[in-house]
Image (cartoon, rainbow, N blue to C red):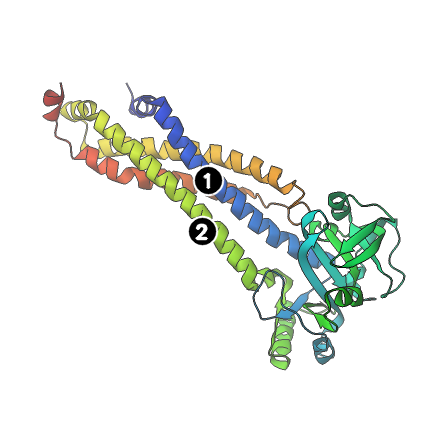
């Protein structure tokens, strides 16, 4: 009988208990994959959306929330003359309920601003001017809201008409209700208020010059934050809270897995006292006994991790297709995240097995005679 045969036999000795332990680990790892994958997907989706609009720098309020707090639109006039700025566009973006959809992106854009340029008409037309009571829907938003050209759409207390269906080159753009900035300002009663300024820099601008430009903007208008597209969500307090909560919830689920594996391995040691003592009596070293228990717990972690990754990947794809979330994000299930999740599961197994392994190595061979 080989060393690994003993290890595998130890796991199969109590298949029901082993299965329940695997379930505990799998749930924890599935939580990591789902929650972290969705938060990363949210971040990536917004960054891709900003780049699709041709945005290089985002200016927003320093106040913390998922969508930035409004500030006066005159800020744009104060910074528009700075070097390397090719174009600016005022925006008012809200994530709110629209009719039957609990979460929908409302993206109000300055009429004539460059943020309209990436929108490609699929059907219908664009609004005629900034005052027309009309909206265009991204393809995904139209599907979620079940709207077609000519249908009414209720935004807060205002009823608008859907005049166009567009695709914007990014999931966030396709999942948005897009309208003119003055229209949304009037609907929510916030004249001259915006919560973001998209800035496009001149083509020859270097990364260093962009960094310097963000510093100049913040120096000129201390109440706002200017960041590059890649840094935008990492500086957002609301998103950082979501990210922290996703990891925190995942760690709690993993802790349950740790306790489950530790309990299983302790029970294994108690039930196999006679076997372990015999192995010590026939020449197995205490180090080898410890390795046997650690290998068993590590294998539990490995199998639980693989199953958890599969469950999490399937679950998050199903969840992202639901009407409540569809159009807001595309989960980022990268190989790095899936690999990290499996490594975490193996680490959970090893850590959980340390005490049971140490305890097993403290047994005395003479106990084999007493147990017999």
Q: Position of residue 162 (x, y in %)?
A: 84, 52
Residue 297, numbered label: none
Residue pictured at 56% horizontal, 66% vertical:
64
Which quadrant of the view contains residue 372? top left
Element type where label 1 sits in the image: helix
- Left or right of 15 on screen, residue 209: right
Relative to 368, 20 lies left or right: right
Q: Residues within 10 Å of mark 2 (few under 14, many from 20)?
A: some
How would you rate the neighbour count of disc 1 (Cα within 10 Å): few for under 14, some for 14-19, many for 20 or more?
Answer: many
Q: Which residue is mark 1?
A: 29
Across and down, in percent, residue 304 comes to 43, 33
Asked if residue 339 can be seen in this view, the reply is no
Q: Residue furthest front?
A: 157
Hey, which quadrant is residue 189 in on the image? bottom right
Read off the residue under disc 2. Answer: 248
Q: Is residue 225 visible?
A: yes
In the depicted structure, whether residue 71 falls above or below residue 262 = below
Q: Picture coordinates of residue 127 (x, y %)?
A: 87, 59
């Amino acid at each position: 009988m080989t060393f690994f045969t003993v290890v595998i036999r130890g796991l199969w000795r109590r298949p029901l208990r082993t299965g329940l332990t695997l379930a505990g680990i799998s749930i924890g790892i599935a939580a990591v994959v789902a929650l972290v994958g969705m938060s990363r997907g949210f971040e990536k989706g917004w960054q891709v959306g900003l780049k699709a609009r041709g945005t290089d720098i985002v200016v927003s309020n320093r106040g913390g929330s998922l969508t930035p707090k409004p500030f006066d639109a005159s800020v744009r006039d104060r910074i528009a003359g700075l070097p390397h700025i090719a174009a600016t566009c005022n925006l008012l973006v809200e994530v709110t309920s629209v009719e039957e959809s609990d979460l929908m992106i409302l993206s109000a854009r300055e009429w004539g601003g460059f943020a309209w340029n990436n929108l490609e008409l699929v059907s219908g037309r664009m609004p005629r001017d900034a005052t027309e009571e009309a909206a265009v829907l991204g393809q995904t938003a139209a599907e979620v809201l079940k709207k077609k050209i000519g249908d009414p759409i209720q935004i807060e207390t205002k009823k608008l008409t859907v005049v166009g269906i567009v695709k914007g080159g990014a999931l966030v753009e396709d999942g948005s209700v897009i309208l003119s900035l003055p229209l949304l300002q009037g609907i929510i009663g916030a004249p001259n208020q915006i919560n973001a300024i998209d800035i496009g820099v001149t083509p020859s601008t270097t990364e260093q010059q962009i960094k310097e430009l963000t510093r100049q903007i913040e120096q000129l208008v201390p109440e706002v934050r200017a960041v590059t597209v890649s840094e935008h969500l990492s500086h957002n307090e609301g998103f950082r809270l979501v990210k922290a909560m996703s990891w925190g919830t995942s760690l709690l689920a993993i802790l349950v897995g740790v306790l489950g594996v530790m309990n299983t391995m302790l029970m294994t040691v108690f039930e196999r006292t006679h076997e372990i003592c015999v192995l010590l009596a026939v020449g197995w070293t205490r180090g080898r006994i410890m390795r046997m228990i650690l290998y068993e717990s590590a294998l539990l972690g490995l199998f639980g991790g693989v199953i958890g990754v599969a469950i999490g990947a399937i679950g998050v794809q199903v969840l992202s297709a639901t009407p409540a979330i569809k159009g807001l994000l595309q989960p980022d299930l990268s190989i790095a995240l899936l690999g990290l999740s499996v490594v975490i599961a193996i680490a959970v197994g090893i850590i959980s097995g340390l005490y049971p392994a140490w305890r097993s190595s403290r047994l005395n061979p003479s106990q084999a005679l007493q147990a017999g």
